[in-house]
Image (cartoon, helix red, strand yellow):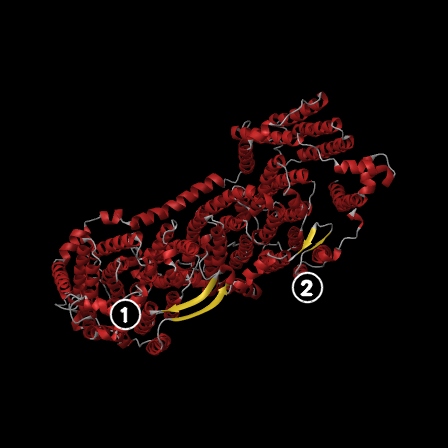
Amino acid sequence: MANSQVPNFFLALPEMWLLLAGCLVLVIDAFGRGKDRNTAYLLSQLTLAVAAVITVAMATDIRIFAFNDSYVSDMMGTVLKTFIYLVTAVVFIYSRDYLRERGLYQGEFFVLALFAVLGMMIMVSAHSFLTIYLGLELLSLSLYAMVALKRDDSDATEAAMKYFVLGALASGMLLYGMSIIYGVTGTLDVGQVAQRLASASEANNLVLAFAVVFVIVGLAFKLGAVPFHMWIPDVYHGAPTPVTLFVGTAPKIAAFAMIMRLLVEGLGDLHAHWRDILIVLSVLSMGIGNIVAIAQTNLKRMLAYSTISHVGFLLLGILSGTENGYASSMFYTLVYAVMGAGGFGMILMLSRSGFEADKIEDFKGLNDRSPWYAFMMLILMFSMAGVPPTLGFYAKLSVIQSLVDVGLVWLAVLAVVFSIIGAFYYLRMVKLMYFDKPVETAPLRANLDLRAVISVNALSVLALGLYPSALMNLCIVALTQP
Amino acid sequence: MVHSVGDQETQRPDVLLLVLALFPASMFLVLLYALITQPLPWAASWTWVPSLGIDLTLWVDGLAAQFLLLITGIGTLVLIYAAGYLAGVTGRARVALLLLLFMAAMIGAVISDHLIVLFMFWELTSVLSFLLVGFSHEQENTRRSAQQALLVTGLGGLALLAGFILLGQIAETYSIQDLIARADRFVGDARLSAALLLIFAGAFTKSAQFPFHFWLPNAMAAPTPVSAYLHSATMVKLGIYLLARLDAAFSDLLLWEVVLVAVGTSTAVGAALQTMRERDLKRILAWSTVATLGTLTMLVGLPGQGAALAVATLFFAHALYKAPLFFVAGNLDHGAGTRIIDQLTGMRRYMPWTAAAALLAAISMAGLPLSFGFIAKDVLTIAKAESEVFKAVSYASVFVSGVSVAAAAVAAIHVFWGRDTVPREAHPHEGSWPMLFPPLLLVTLGVLFGLAPTLVDPILGAAARAIAPGLDADAVRNAYDATPVISATLSAVLIGVVIYRNWDRMHALLERAHFLDVLGPESWYWRKLAFLPKLAAWLTRRLQHGRLPGYVLVLIGTCSVVLFALVGVTWPTWQAVEVSAPELPVLLACALIAAGALATLFVRDHLVLLLVSGLVGYGSAALFLFTGAPDLAFTQFAVETVFVVVAATLLVRLRRAPATASSALREPVLRPVALVVSITFAVVLTALLLFVSAQPFDSTLSEYFGAQSVPAAHGRNVVNVIIVDFRALDTLGEIGVLLFALLAALPLLRLGRGARSEAT
């Protein structure tokens, strides 16, 4: 059997490096002297940087499989992984001060995050249902622990508990769906599943329809699509803001990869089955997400609902079932991760010891306190609302266009209507920042690196908006690779 | 407020703003030179976002050129005016910068030939106007109006985007010129009406057309230079510009004509009525601007070449007289400290130059002979005569002109002539030169063009040809008939004089017409604004209650509903399933599982709960035993036993700890919804299982292992062979995992021992 061959380990070098480095950081942090955790921080950043270098250096323009076809190295993986490293590095930079001021500046945060990144990498490169599931669980378990990092905080532990129970349930559903697919096709390999589905009998098709439902429930939960979104607001709110920032950004990229591998590549033949379910999910997500966000007084909760609505949008591209649609969804996901990082980063920058800055009114009159960062937040809010010429506009535009291309005009119009409703609460933030009197008058204090990176983050949303072709082409190239 | 009476005389014009005015001024001159030397149209194209089919295509024809002249020309004057008006005001540099950016956005909007690019600049103007309107944001109403303006125009903009995408889909091009060229190919498309209605929504919000007109007068809270520029000369005309742009493609459509004429006329009449309800000069001007915009919309809707010429002329004339009037209102505000007309009479004594500008602008606005406004009225009357509109539209138009005569009279006569009877603390004063030069220049141009219309003929003709391609200016001129023009002017002046003489009485009468407030779209706007948050709050309470069991219920419930629906849809296939009766031992095992599961529902004690849930495990083990998997059964027995023992030990320990007194579950005995959901879920899953087990079993793998067990691995126990031979590497890995887990558990165990020894 093929088992006897030595697998091409080399292809998974980024994953192996991250595993090794993560363990090293854990050990060094555990035996390191003093209370200063800068070593762990710096080593984690170094780990990500090296991983990025390895990943980019190993990029090929053909798809290569390894480990009995359960691992694939392709352009999509390279692009998504690089973004995961980037977003995680930014998360680390944003989080440092916040963690230090609250006594959470521990090696665990960084190590768990690194293992979560490893989980995401596996999800991105997985080419077998089993590998996908392994990556997902590694990611999820790390995230559960991270949410509960602030052990003595009842909000955080409650959020972690809910996340864990619901997440385990959803994982179970996903696994159940996968096992049905295995039962029908006799393989866990994504490529072979796709081949064998093409010749499935009628009875098997029926069973597969059930499998699709279970798989989608699992995926929708991980993404946070309505009605499987309940964990998102509670977890975003309850978790320490740096963890929220992390949960809200990088894992979405991995979830997109999971959808691509599982649904598009593996179950592409069943597009007719999953398309309608995704339509319902995305309409509900855009509707509930955008409407409920209006009522929120807590910015983290508002961004949670905004995430839900963005998830609805990115599902639109996938359900269109075309290369363009997938590329636009990928673009949307990456753009969302960048915008989300900036949005939560602003909360982190405004917060300080004993003050969370996570209420919407904490942003009142920000323009009087700091015109520059008010402008940065303005760009981010406009981008999330989809106002041109920011990146968020192109993300929405390309998704909507891919819908129109396949004749789903009504859905496209609905998407525009929901983004109109969504614009309401983003613009309210802008109004608060520019036209209201500040409640909080203390000047902004944040480290230089945080200030610099958040400025770059927000400005890139604008700059890339002026020339979106580069990122968009990257997505198209990544998805149309032979 | 951005100013106060008296201390302004010492304010010197702001040099920075004057310098910044050089930018648009030089652009204006370059443009003028280019227009004279280079024949129109100019076109250029670059690819921008190829994957979305977005090209940066520029197209400058007569219509765009006319707008460019207005944008840069009036832009220059506005910046000069702001140098005087905003002198010494904090944040003036920001206003100037935003004005320049706004100018750039406007330029982008009128020269782009690509619908999506046009939309981007369009939205940019909305956003920049939001920041400009909110400039003096200390006042609550300013903030509200800035938000209102942004919401209305921003939302309209999104409708516009939807319309553009749809239109692009129908026409298979986003280029406006291509669209016009191949219009006859797709005008029959059923989706076109939807696309056009969406585009109307965008254009009407931008150009303050009924029923979206209410935001414009409220936006008058902005500083005067901003109002003059955005809300009169440029931005609000963008909607009309778009309609005029597309007119060449759709002017033959009935929908196009009916909607534009109806909406334009009702806007004009409504705004004329509202004009008479105001006492604030700036708001009077704002409503009269809305009326003009309505007239423009109506003209775009009218078929015929005269209408196209009328649109171009009125665009131009309006900019030449309305901008100076806004400047006049600003000078009054600045010099006398108020814009309320009751407190403004006889201002001519204090501000002679402003008075002169007001008079000349008002003559043009009233459409009196020898002014450019008269020329505009001229063409307008011809256009209406040419296209045989309904009589109602004609009468409405005369009424609107009458009100506009009256409003002009209020601005020029009521305010400046007569005696100053209002007691004041300080004498009003004339504005500095930057505040006088712009209005005076514009009104002078108005008089000049009124006397010699041939000076602007080329540009107006070119603009009209862009709107109606086949336009023959000579034909229009030859068809000129003075009679209707004179009668229209006379009747408008007559009505205007009557209204002006009875202004206060009309005002008192209309003031009482409160139904205009209640029924107006504005109150609807606020009601809708209040409704959304209420809905949102209600949804939050219903969906995000924070209780985990509820969340689980939704998760399982949704699955059950979807799966149940799936069974329903595919019912015929299910009927074919044959279920054979299970053997007795299997049945017993199942009964054990069911008993365990059911018992968990009624047990309240944690420990007992654990034990009965163990029944489920033992039941499954028994099931494995009787269905031919004894090895699995033994594993299951072992795992279940170990689990129950370990968990029970933990529970007993926890119970001893005083902190956790609540070992019994505090859950309601019965949750009806949960019961229904779980039964549904169970039924569906059982059905699925039955269906699957009725399918033929794929025995490739078991046959392979069975056949290879002896020859390949020399073992008779197939299970053992699989574990230690065929999958030896997996087993090694599993052992490794176990060992690592133990390694991790060791320090924990030691920790516990240490704690105990400390305690004793």
Describe residue A389's horizontal placement relative to residue A14 as left or right. Answer: left
Position of the C terminus of chain A, as image quadrant, is: bottom right
**A215 with respect to B371 (left or right):** right
For disc 1, the chain is B
Where is residue B412? Give x, y as percent: 17, 67
B656 lies left or right of B52: right
Q: Which residue is mark 2?
A: A57
The answer to whether residue A313 is visible is yes
- Callout in the foreground (1, 2): 1
Residue A137 screen position, x and y as percent: 66, 46
Mark 1, other Cα within 10 Å: few <14 / some 14–19 / many ≥20 = many
Q: Secondary structure at mark 1?
A: helix
> Of B371 and B486, which appears nearest the observer?
B486
Quarter of image, res B645: top right
Compared across the picture, whether B290 is left or right of B163 comes to left
Image coordinates of residue A123 in percent, x first then y, are: 65, 50
**In the image, what residue occupies the spot 72% across and 22% down?**
B585
Q: Amino acid at mark 2?
A: Ala
Image location of residue A324, percent across then percent down: 54, 55
Q: From where the camera sits, is residue B94 visible?
A: no
Identify the residue under disc 1: B461
The amino acid sitting under disc 1 is Gly
Q: Residues within 10 Å of mark 2 (few under 14, many from 20)?
A: few
Q: Is residue A104 above or below residue B446?
A: above
Query: Of helix, strand and loop, which one carries label 2?
Result: helix
Instruction: Pinpoint the chain carrying mark 2.
Output: A
The numbered dot on residue B251 is none
